[in-house]
Amino acid sequence: MIGIDMKALTGETALWLASERYVELAQRALEMRESSYCPYSGFAVGAALLTEEGRVYTGCNIENAAYSVTVCAERTALFKAVSEGERRFSAIAVAGGKADGPAGGLCTPCGVCRQALREFCGPDFAVVCPITDEKGTLSELRIYALDELLPDSFGPDDLGR
């Protein structure tokens, strides 16, 4: 877990504002699990992606009988945002768990989603992972920097972009 560099904000105010925004983002991700289409894995995932301008794009996992066609919640949210012209993001919340119960434990983006996020997000991009109790109530937020989850990553800057 890390501290997030809030750039323009400092001190306790920045921490409070970040945590409030991340709680909102986490709640949106938890809600998006309800839209998940996961008849094969039974694992429902929701995501909420925050742009630097404050807009939120949501997504859920969408499975397919031809497994390779399945799309994760994180990429659904990212692709929706990019298709609407967004290119700058500050955080994503990801919540997952058995479809017939609360999100529960830690759920981080898969490797493919980490790489997709890396295309548009820098190493300090925040990945917010909500953890719920057995009733589905948010009990903890774990926050990681993208470079913690995808160390020594390959991105646009490696191609001179």
Image (spheres, rainbow, N blue to C red):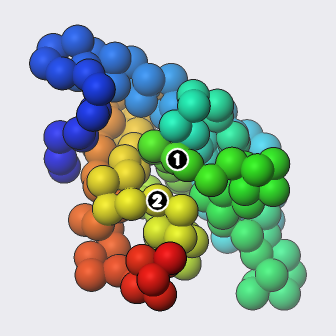
Q: Is residue 131 left or right of residue 118?
A: left
Q: Position of residue 78 (x, y in %)?
A: 66, 56
Q: Position of residue 113 (x, y in %)?
A: 55, 70
Q: Position of residue 98 (x, y in %)?
A: 58, 54
The residue closer to the viewer here, 132 or 48, is 48
Residue 20 shown left or right of residue 32 in the figure: left
Query: What residue is shown at x 13% (from left), y 18% (from top)?
Result: 11
Above/below status of 137 relative to 48: above
Q: Would residue 76 be visible to someone looking at this image?
A: no
Q: Secondary structure at mark 2?
A: loop
Give the answer, above or below, for where 115 lies relative to 109: below
Left of 53 or right of it: where is 32?
A: right
Mark 2 or mark 1: whose residue is earlier in sequence:
1
Residue that numbered label 1 is attached to: 89
Residue 38 or 111: which is nearer the viewer? Answer: 111
Q: Which residue is at a point 78% across and 44% down the rendered structure image? A: 35
Identified by mark 1, the residue type is Phe
Residue type indicated by callout 2 = Cys
The residue labelled by disc 2 is: 121
Is residue 159 among the parts visible in the rendering? yes
Q: Position of residue 101 (x, y in %)?
A: 58, 43
Distance CA(mark 2)–CA(mark 1):
6 Å
Res. 122 image quadrant: bottom left
- Residue lying at 27% horizontally and 34% vertically, measured from the top left: 7
User: On the image, which quarter does residue 21 sit in?
Assistant: top left
